[in-house]
Amino acid sequence: MRAVNSKHWRVQAGQRSIRMKKTPTRPFTILVVDDVEETRDLLESLLRESGYEVLSARNEEDIRLKSRRRNLDLILIGIGSPVSKSIELGERMRLAAGVQENVAIVIFCCPEIEEGSEVHLAGNVHLTRLDNFDQLRQLLFRLLDIGYSAQ
């Protein structure tokens, strides 16, 4: 894997890969929302390589256009928001995507959260500030309840 830096992610050459323990009957579908094209493209590529189906959007209007009539399993949001506004942001994105509360929302660039940490808020909204892509994969495996094995 090449070393990649973007606004939100640092992927180092030589990171170990993590594979799913069990294969779902259909690929999990993740909606990536970020206003920075480079970050969206990087996450989309890394998630596809990990076996996910990925949609990407840059704002709420884009979400409405791309996610309707799709079975989303998780929404990954890279729009910086203070903790006090995160539940509201998550609910707006959920409404725009037309999904129920059982679909987890992960806001991954919250500046008030310590790097490498995660906070679970009401309404199946999770705040995190992940240090690398392997941490994101582990979080996704846990939230999607698919388990993982490091290789």
Image: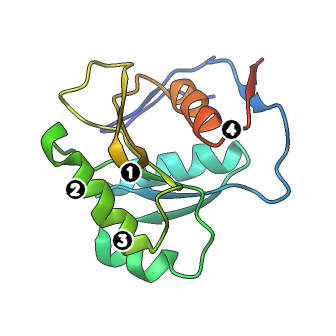
Mark 4 closeness class: few <14, some 14–19, many ≥20 residues within 10 Å: few
Q: Which residue is mark 1?
A: 38
Q: Counting residues from the N terminus, which is met first, the one under dot 3 or under dot 4?
A: 3
Q: Which mark is residue 58?
A: none
Three-letter code, disc 2: Glu
Q: Which residue is mark 2?
A: 88
Residue closer to the observer: 150 or 96: 96
Q: Counting residues from the N terminus, which is met first, the one under dot 2 or under dot 1?
A: 1
Q: Which residue is mark 3?
A: 95
Between disc 1 and disc 3, the foreground one is: 3
Q: Quadrant of the C terminus?
A: top right
Residue closer to the observer: 94 or 57: 94
Q: Secondary structure at mark 4?
A: loop
Q: Secondary structure at mark 2?
A: helix
Q: Which residue is mark 4?
A: 145
Residue 45's x, y, as percent?
58, 49
Q: Counting residues from the N terminus, which is met first, the one under dot 4 or under dot 2?
A: 2
Q: Counting residues from the N terminus, which is met first, the one under dot 1 or under dot 3?
A: 1
